[in-house]
Image (tube, coloured by chain):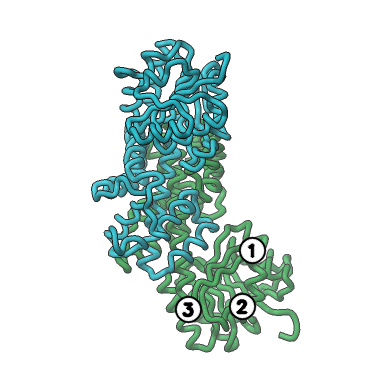
Chain colours: A cyan, B green
Amino acid sequence: MQDAKKAAVVGLGSMGWGAALSLLRAGFSVNGCDVRADVLQHFIEAGGNACTNPAEAAEGADAVFIFVVNSKQAEDVIFGLQGALETAAPGTAFLLCTTMAPSAAIAIAERLEAAGMLVVDAPVSGGHLKALSGEMTVMGSGSEKAFAQAKAALDAVSTKVFRLGDTPGIGSKVKMINQLLAGVHIAAAAEAMTLAAKSGIDLRTLYDVLRVSAGSSWMFENRGEHIVSGDYTPRSAVNIFVKDLDIVTSEAGRTGAVTPLAATALNLFKEAAEAGLGLEDDAAVAKILARKSGATLPGMEDRT
Amino acid sequence: MQDAKKAAVVGLGSMGWGAALSLLRAGFSVNGCDVRADVLQHFIEAGGNACTNPAEAAEGADAVFIFVVNSKQAEDVIFGLQGALETAAPGTAFLLCTTMAPSAAIAIAERLEAAGMLVVDAPVSGGHLKALSGEMTVMGSGSEKAFAQAKAALDAVSTKVFRLGDTPGIGSKVKMINQLLAGVHIAAAAEAMTLAAKSGIDLRTLYDVLRVSAGSSWMFENRGEHIVSGDYTPRSAVNIFVKDLDIVTSEAGRTGAVTPLAATALNLFKEAAEAGLGLEDDAAVAKILARKSGATLPGMEDRT
């Protein structure tokens, strides 16, 4: 650590990519790892070190960010063959940024800690634009020592780090509940737009009025715009909410909590994925509601 | 109209009361009408003219605000015995501020216009505090002539008047869709808080994090605070959302739109009303979810 601090980012998707670039801007030497060759090539052009596997990426890193899609992948890239644990030095900070079931985050953290690593359960929020600008929000939990080891790296990727508790799992629980709300709000925005279309209301006018009214939400403001302009370029895909709301309903089932709205929204996202919309923007759940309602939303005339 | 302008407010509930006081502050002579004698007494003390029936209130008024609870009451106070139409002069502006089914607003407006009146379909938003400060939002529709006649009165009660179309009904449709979102968001906030409680998350911490995250909504910010502090003093009651979400699902059924989230939320509000919580704050829908989940939320220890 006499020279530049070194960080690894495993998974250069929309959030991991932004984190990696933010670390480079902050002066880190950054090892990036992804299964897609074109992404690695772009990463080299951006000034990063492209690594072909997590073990190579974790070598010499002070902090290892895990930004893969789900807990299964997280286990693979950490504990699997050529996983990060093969090379990470004891005391390395592992930042678990993947949205996963709290129970999975706890299990992974326990194995890492048993191997002498420091762990911050660190799911993030803010979307890909905030990731790119280094302004993510981190819903973190972990030991004081782990936060201290990770501080410079966390500061590079985020403007707000909540430290929600001393043990991994709490961050993932808070993120899970954020996703419950976010998923229901996206589906509600889709339902509102569909009813408006069926009622003969101009969607742009509706959007302009409701985004500043008591019916508004962060997601209505953000995804409502996608629906009104019929733009389903994926910023965050339908499949993500199939995964995240499944985490919500599974954990709810485990604890005995009833979550009828999350379950209803999950069914809509699942239907969208089954209809082949899984890789479209999550606002495409509106197309499912529109089809069931016999409505036509913007962008549905030519491609449904 | 050579002297002070005169307005009538029929229904001095939480929104009508605020509108009436705002009109007084703006220099209007205000005739107020309500079935509750104590409210009329307070209104006299505030500088208003207390009227015992709508006919008395509408006499000589340039604008008549209808702020009763539902469309049935609106019909009664306008067209019934001692209703406003008995005394209102042709060309009086009727402001239909009650949240009602768009079809009901259209029917009432047609009868009023046939009697020579001007009508603005004028549902409002903003809550009782904005009503008190004269800062409501009006989701209005109606003829240019009606808006011109109502302008001074509308300006007195609101800071933002959307003119959404030339005919009554459009305002009520936009308000209906606002209520769809608002009702679902309140129920989602309740569901989120319940799952958090079951997961062992501190609710105040959760609230502080999520109110500034992508899972936030106007309602999560507003009603989430009620749930965290266990304060179910009614600002807007459970019964209001039983009514408003029933309008949503009825109109959706009429147009063929599917509204699974609104239907799910409506069931929760109905359960809350059936459990005797109808007059509590609408956030009390959380108590229903908590009971079903075996969770205890703040304020549920002593009184459930």
**What numbered label is drawn on residue B150?**
2
Name the residue type under label 3.
Thr
Name the residue type under label 1.
Gly
The alpha-carbon separation of the residues under discs 2 and 3 comes to 15 Å
Check the residue under mark 3 and report the chain it is in. Answer: B
* Image position of A163 with respect to B228: above or below: above
Q: Residues within 10 Å of mark 3 (few under 14, many from 20)?
A: some
| Residue at (44, 35) in percent of width and height | A17
Q: Which tag is nearer the camera, tag 2 or tag 1?
A: 2
- The N terminus of chain B sits in image quarter: bottom right
Q: Is residue B91 left or right of residue B296?
A: right
Check the residue under mark 1 and report the chain it is in. Answer: B
Q: Residues within 10 Å of mark 1 (few under 14, many from 20)?
A: many
The alpha-carbon separation of the residues under discs 3 and 1 comes to 26 Å
| Residue at (34, 52) in percent of width and height | A284
* Residue under numbered circle 1: B18
Secondary structure state at the residue bearing disc 3: loop
Q: Do the numbered discs 2 and 1 sit on residues whose CB atoms are within 8 Å?
A: no
Viewer-side residue, A109 vs B220:
A109
**What numbered label is drawn on residue B167?**
3
Task: Say if residue A16 shows up in the picture.
Answer: no
The alpha-carbon separation of the residues under discs 2 and 1 comes to 17 Å
Give the mark nearer the N terminus: 3 vs 1.
1
Secondary structure state at the residue bearing disc 1: helix
Task: Say if residue B239 shows up in the picture.
Answer: yes
Q: Quadrant of residue A44?
A: top left
